[in-house]
Image (cartoon, rainbow, N blue to C red):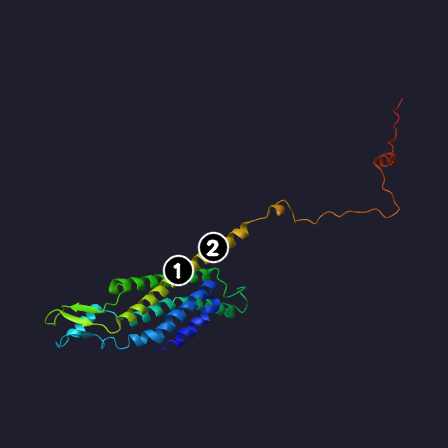
Amino acid sequence: MNWGFLENVLSGVNKYSTVVGRIWLSVLFIFRILVFVAAAEQVWKDENKDFVCNTNQPGCENVCFDQFFPISQMRLWALQLIMVSTPSLLVALHVAYREHRESKHGRKLYEDKGRIDGGLLCTYLLSLVLKTAFEVGTLLTFYFLYHFDVPRLLRCEESPCPNTVDCYISKPTEKKVFLYIMGCTSILCIILNLTEMLYIMSKQCWKCFSKRYIPVDHKGACHCHPPPTLILNPPGLKPESESQKMTQLPSPQTVKEPT
């Protein structure tokens, strides 16, 4: 399988992610895709051929292999990696939609097309929920099918086996180690997804709180009218006192009453 296409697509999503999202993407590339491509594919390369049972009955080995491995672990890992990577493309598609709107209207509609707010915030949170759900679902599948264990000896009584036969798995310890590695990295990615959700929600709550907050020093200030101007007397001219102003007022004329 060619994983280069998936790597190129997710690298484009990286610039729209948060700090925690970039850490998640690094864990996905280094500890999951790289480990899967470099080592896990070689360990499970011919798992059906390396499954041996101590019988020559035709079809017995195939039936026993299908009983203990209904889904190939390698293909289940590949399906998990694809499913947890696909929701990240929703963010890139939403950003592309914003760019299309701006080109359609011929003007700038967003301060930053990659800023996580508005509809892009809902899309980002939806992608995190989907990634977490896929991770949890795959872990539960591994648990109910294999119990995170690769035994060395399996006893099979399925038809057309003539009796109880012993079947042996190739490299059981090595497969168990890789199974634990993939399980631990999956749990780490779940923790990172939950941390990123809390980080984004707390950041949005703080932004809403900061918009509503008004400092106490500016509550009584009124910026509707300019402050009054202060007129200064020219130099050498003394201000008149109140008593001088009263003496300069014209006295009322006395009116003589007619006799």
Instruction: Residue 249 in the image: state x and y as whole percent.
Output: 86, 35
Instruction: Residue 43 in the image: state x and y as whole percent.
Output: 30, 75
Dot 1 surroundings within 10 Å: few (below 14), some, or many (20 or more)? some
Residue holding disc 2:
202
Q: Amino acid at mark 1?
A: Ile
Dot 2 surroundings within 10 Å: few (below 14), some, or many (20 or more)? few
Quadrant of the image occupied by residue 133: bottom left
In what element is the residue under mark 1?
Answer: helix
Q: Can residue 166 be seen from the camera position used here? A: yes
Left or right of 110? Residue 78 is left
Instruction: Residue 56 in the image: state x and y as whole percent.
Output: 13, 77
Please tell me how many numbered marks the rendered image carries. Answer: 2
Quadrant of the image occupied by residue 84: bottom left
Which residue is at 44% across, 65% downward?
Answer: 23
Q: Can residue 18 be seen from the camera position used here? A: no
Residue holding disc 1:
191
- Dot placed on the residue nearer the N-terminal end, 2 or 1: 1
Q: Is residue 65 above or below residue 188?
A: below
Which residue is at 29% across, 68% downward?
Answer: 176
Q: Amino acid at mark 2?
A: Ser
- Name the one closer to the observer, 241 or 107: 241
